[in-house]
Amino acid sequence: MAIKPMPDATLRDSFRESVIARASVLPWVLRLLNIGPILILILLAIVVSILTPNFLKPINLGNILAQIAVIATVAIGQHVVILTRGIDLSVGSNLALATVMGGLVFRMTDSSTAVMLAMLLSGTAIGAVNGLVYVFGRLPHPFIITLATLSICRGLALEFSVGHTTMRGMPDAIAALGGYSYFGIPNSFFVVLAVVLVAAVFTRYMVWGRWLYAVGGDPQAARGMGIPVRGVLVSAYVISGLCAGIGAILLSGRTGASSPLYGDLLELDTIAAVIIGGASFLGGRGHIGHALVGALMIGVIRNALNLLNVDVFFQMIAIGVIIVVAVEADVLRNRLEAQARALQSTRLQ
Amino acid sequence: MKKPSAAPVLSVHRAQKRFGAIEALKDVSLEIFKGEVLALLGDNGAGKSTLVKCISGLHALDGGEITIDGKRAALSSPAAARRAGIETVYQDLALFDNLTPAQNFYCGREIAYPSWLPQALRFLDRQTMDREAAAVIERLKVKLPKFDAPVALMSGGQRQAIAVARATVFARKVVILDEPTAALGVRESRKVLDLILQLKAEGNAVILITHNMEQVVELADRAIVLRQGRKVGELKPSRSNQQKLVSMIVGAEA
Ligand SMILES: Nc1ncnc2c1ncn2[C@@H]1O[C@H](COP(=O)(O)OP(=O)(O)OP(=O)(O)O)[C@@H](O)[C@H]1O
Ligand SMILES: [Mg+2]
């Protein structure tokens, strides 16, 4: 900063005052930006319930929860990956392949445990491939490998389902998990809450979570501090794959079928949920619950536009616009943080 | 028989390091003793950071060896170097912007339980870590605006002070500081220099990289000069040979 002589004392004082004023407002603005997504979600719900009274009916709310269960679950895994500055484009096809694997196992056995295990294992295995190839293949960015597995998984799913676009039938337990409700709340939403809870404990209270944030914050520094960066990265993609597997159980339970066509564009929905929820592509920021908030926001918007008879393509446009707003909010937050830092230095002089 | 203090804590013997066509280190040797501040000097690109990154396990040497307390040390990773008692404040990667001071303090060696689980799956003992980090920061008189905010919100001086404070806490043998006062004001620099003196008083061997000759004369017991990856001189810095030191660094000695 250039040091200019201040013409007189009053000017200097007013400068100081404005510095102090900004310094006290800034933290508030930053805090507001951090809880912004939740505020917007609440605001959105209020506006929609005024526009259409059907919105608040329990059955409709239950529908929203059922509709977002898959997005929310898979978005948790996506968030873990985004925390490490990565991205997982394969989640949709990974989920489709997992449902097909589950469907194939169901032809051989009625055991719901076996079918679920097949889906979870399939999802996790693809996640492991993503992580291992990314890290040990020394790829510049996970975009490339997960784009490849996006294509490979879809191909495998179509190949294994030999021409069937849907394979009917799922064991009762899976149908119950994905399709039934308990006091108006879909069972799948309890699964979502459980996944969020476990993910929150792992990311906030365990050393692994701290490493996740460190690697996302600064991969080089994480290595310098002795954190097993490669292991952390691989684990993130494994978790994302596992979440895709859980999502496969929920989706095939809800539909009572498996299909190689499931999960189309799910990567976009989950990335949107994470970003709308307030995480940052820069990595290392955001609470895991934000993915749930983001998914809820997408669910509410789609539902509201449906209730208001708005065309489907407007929904896509609306989601797109909101993504831009969310990313801009992140940019704004980073700028304000830089300002806060500058103010910190001035105040110390 | 040698007295224990006469054996170097750390010695580097004929270190070699290449990055493709660039020979960043050519046959560099150095020794450092307990309670000593060694200044590592050289122009930009001389190889100072490369040398300390080899010592702290971030780079593997292409040739030569490093011994700690006379024993050959395999510093294959930063974790191994930290376990061997080498603490580093890097020039370019000091802190995690997205973590709080306490989280930064313990990053990579979190206090966690239960001990029978692998470290990654243990639960963070956040209270202990917060309390101890706060105590250290208090003791070192580092003023922070807020203790629970990410360090992204803090000034350059505060961040540097946190990084150095972390090194002072975990230091067990060797502390390496790569330009710890670059980008700091006079007062903030003073604080860091005091911390360095404290490290020395506690018996650590300190390797200090700096471009500031005043600091070298004030703090360093010995200075080593690198130029284009070679060691070109070693002397005891003082006011009278300060000028000689500078010409060694830029390669203009008669
Ligand atoms: N990771 C790397 N890959 C390739 N070249 C590198 C790498 N790190 C350093 N170098 C090169 O090695 C040489 C020594 O660099 P180094 O960072 O050790 O210099 P330095 O003495 O620390 O300089 P400064 O005072 O600017 O920090 C330079 O030519 C630099 O370009
Ligand atoms: Mg350097």
Image: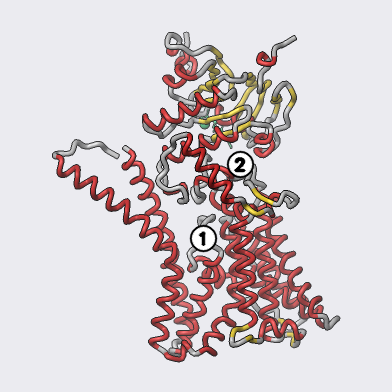
Q: Is disc 1 placed on a helix, strand or loop? A: loop
Tags 1 and 2 on a common chain: yes
Give coordinates of residue A265: x percent, y percent.
Answer: 58, 74
Task: In the rendered view, tell whether residue B35 sits above or below residue B124.
Answer: above
The amino acid at mark 2 is Met
Residue A4 shown left or right of residue A105 in the figure: left
- Considering the image in quadrants, where does the C terminus of chain A appear? top left
**Any atom of ligand 1 within 8 Å of the CB at mark 1?**
no
Q: In 3D space, how far apart are the residues under numbered discs 1 and 2 (Cα atoms)?
A: 22 Å
Residue to which mark 2 is pinned: A225
Q: Tell me what residue is drawn at x 70 percent, y 27 percent.
A: B63
**Disc 1 vs disc 2: Cβ atoms closer than 8 Å?**
no
Chain to which the residue tagged by mark 2 belongs? A
Give coordinates of residue A267: x percent, y percent.
Answer: 59, 70
Give coordinates of residue A54: x percent, y percent.
Answer: 46, 91
Q: Tell me what residue is drawn at x 74 percent, y 78 percent.
A: A100
Give coordinates of residue B233: x percent, y percent.
Answer: 55, 14
Task: In the rendered view, tell whether residue B213 sits above or below residue A186.
Answer: above
Which numbered disc flags the more N-terminal residue, 1 or 2? Answer: 2
In the image, A333 versus A36, the foreground residue is A36
Residue to which mark 1 is pinned: A286
In the image, B226 versus A291, the foreground residue is A291
Residue A102 location, quadrant: bottom right
Q: Is residue A140 visible?
A: no
- Considering the image in quadrants, where does the N terminus of chain A appear? top left
Mark number displayed over residue B240: none
The amino acid at mark 1 is Gly
Q: Tell me what residue is drawn at x 52 percent, y 31 percent.
A: B178
